[in-house]
Image (spheres, rainbow, N blue to C red):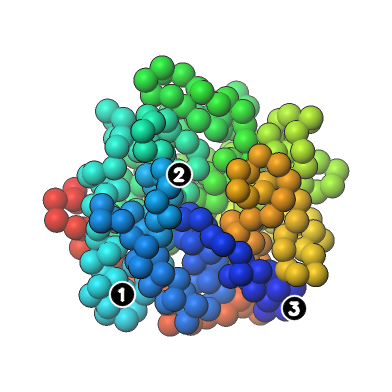
């Protein structure tokens, strides 16, 4: 890692992280090859696990946010043989597969006490399910969210759907929400690798569709509107990082054309110029309410994820030579664990 990347990593670890940010931050640690830190992240997520299985809980209303930490808990459990981590992973999977409140078609709700479907959920659950051997259930979650939130005319996702009212309750094409979807599909395809089978083409096609729709609204400063198609919304750079991660991952993994490599690097460069002296990525949709410009642990994580993807692409045969983003014992894929008791195949 260069100096800027190290500062961004240090700032991410210093920031207080919410439940999903613990998971996304751990994804960055895995991709950077920071195995020792990834092991700590997994243990911390289990330390704050709810009895019902939700990982990394801060006792908030989120039903699915902590599931983003499933991947690191699973990876560390398999690498170390830690039975306690494996049991924690299975509790989280049981919650996702059986116990979490959901619509009649199985699409998961985002918050306790609400029957709303959010675009954010796609990133929290789709890679988690794919990485633990539940690709069909992951595809079903994406499909359920797509039916409710995706606008075929614009190629963009709305933010939220009310299941009881059977209508959108937040129809805005929130930038970060679209970023969650594209990044989720990119990570899921990466985790699946050659096991993607018949899922590869439709998932890749949909990710590219949303990616292209967002790129049509890119601003002159290299970033995007907080609401992608609203010129009056504030300029926001985390979507640029999320799309950079997806584009660079897609080229490295062979489901996006080579031309997207330059796009991904340019998107990341637009975020890099916003990194301040303390390593904070500024000018992103900011914590804690994500309604105005600021900083956030999730934005720190996506800078690192995109950077690691750029390094991996540079080391991929047939692309521009470069150095890898690191490689530790937790990086190689391992066979998925058996489904928890009662889980569908």
Report, in whole angstroms, how far the alpha carbon at label 2 lies from the one at label 1: 24 Å
Between marks 3 and 1, how big is the CA–CA gap?
A: 32 Å
Task: Say few, some or many: other residues with alpha carbon within 10 Å of mark 2 (under 14 / 14 to 19 / 20 or more).
Answer: many
Quadrant of the drawing holding the N terminus: bottom right
Vertical placement of residue 90 versus 225, above or below:
below
**Residue 72 position in % (x across, y down):** 41, 67
Rendered image: mark on residue 3: 3
Secondary structure, mark 1, is: helix
Q: Is residue 345 visible?
A: yes
Q: Which mark is residue 78?
A: 1
Secondary structure beneath dot 3 equals helix
Which of discs 3 and 1 lies nearer the camera? The answer is 3
| Name of the residue lying farthest toward the left | 342
Residue 337, which numbered label? Answer: none
Q: How many marks are shown on the rendered structure?
A: 3
Left or right of 291 on screen, residue 186: left
Residue at x 49%, y 61% (from the top left corner) = 22
User: 17 or 209, which lies in front?
Assistant: 17
Which comes sooner in the sequence, label 3 or label 2?
3
Q: First in sequence, mark 3 or 1: give its number.
A: 3
CB under 8 Å between discs 3 and 2: no
Instruction: Residue 107 in the image: state x and y as whole percent.
Output: 34, 35
- Residue under label 2, please give it: 122
Q: Residue at x 41, y 69 (%)?
A: 44
Q: Residue 124 vs residue 248: left or right? A: left
Q: Can residue 200 be seen?
A: no
């Amino acid at each position: 890692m260069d100096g800027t990347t190290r500062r961004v990593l240090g700032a991410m670890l210093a920031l207080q992280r919410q439940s999903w940010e613990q998971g996304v931050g751990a994804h960055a640690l895995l991709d950077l090859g920071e195995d020792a830190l990834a092991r700590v992240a997994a243990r911390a997520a289990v330390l704050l696990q709810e009895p019902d299985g939700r990982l990394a809980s801060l006792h908030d209303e989120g039903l699915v946010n902590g599931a983003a930490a499933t991947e690191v808990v699973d990876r560390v459990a398999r690498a170390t043989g830690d039975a306690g981590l494996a049991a924690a992973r299975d509790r989280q999977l049981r919650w996702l597969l059986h116990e979490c409140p959901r619509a009649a078609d199985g699409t998961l709700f985002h918050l306790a006490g609400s029957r709303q479907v959010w675009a954010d959920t796609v990133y929290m659950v789709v890679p988690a399910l794919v990485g633990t051997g539940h690709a069909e259930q992951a595809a079903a979650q994406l499909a359920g969210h797509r039916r409710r939130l995706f606008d075929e005319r614009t190629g963009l996702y709305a933010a939220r759907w009310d299941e009881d009212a059977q209508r959108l309750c937040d129809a805005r094409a929130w930038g970060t929400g679209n970023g969650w979807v594209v990044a989720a599909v990119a990570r899921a395809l990466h985790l699946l690798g050659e096991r993607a089978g018949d899922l590869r083409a439709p998932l890749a096609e949909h990710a590219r569709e949303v990616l292209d729709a967002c790129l049509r609204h890119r601003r002159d400063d290299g970033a995007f509107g907080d609401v992608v198609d609203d010129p009056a919304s504030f300029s926001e750079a985390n979507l640029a990082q999320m799309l950079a991660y997806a584009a660079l991952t897609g080229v490295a993994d062979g489901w996006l054309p080579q031309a997207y490599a330059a796009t991904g690097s340019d998107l990341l460069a637009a975020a890099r110029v916003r990194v301040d002296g303390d390593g904070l990525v500024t000018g992103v949709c900011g914590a804690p309410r994500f309604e105005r410009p600021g900083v956030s642990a999730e934005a720190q994580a996506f800078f690192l994820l995109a950077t690691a993807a750029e390094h991996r692409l540079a080391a991929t045969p047939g692309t521009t030579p470069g150095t890898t983003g690191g490689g530790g014992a937790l990086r190689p894929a391992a066979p998925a664990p058996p489904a928890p008791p009662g889980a569908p195949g």
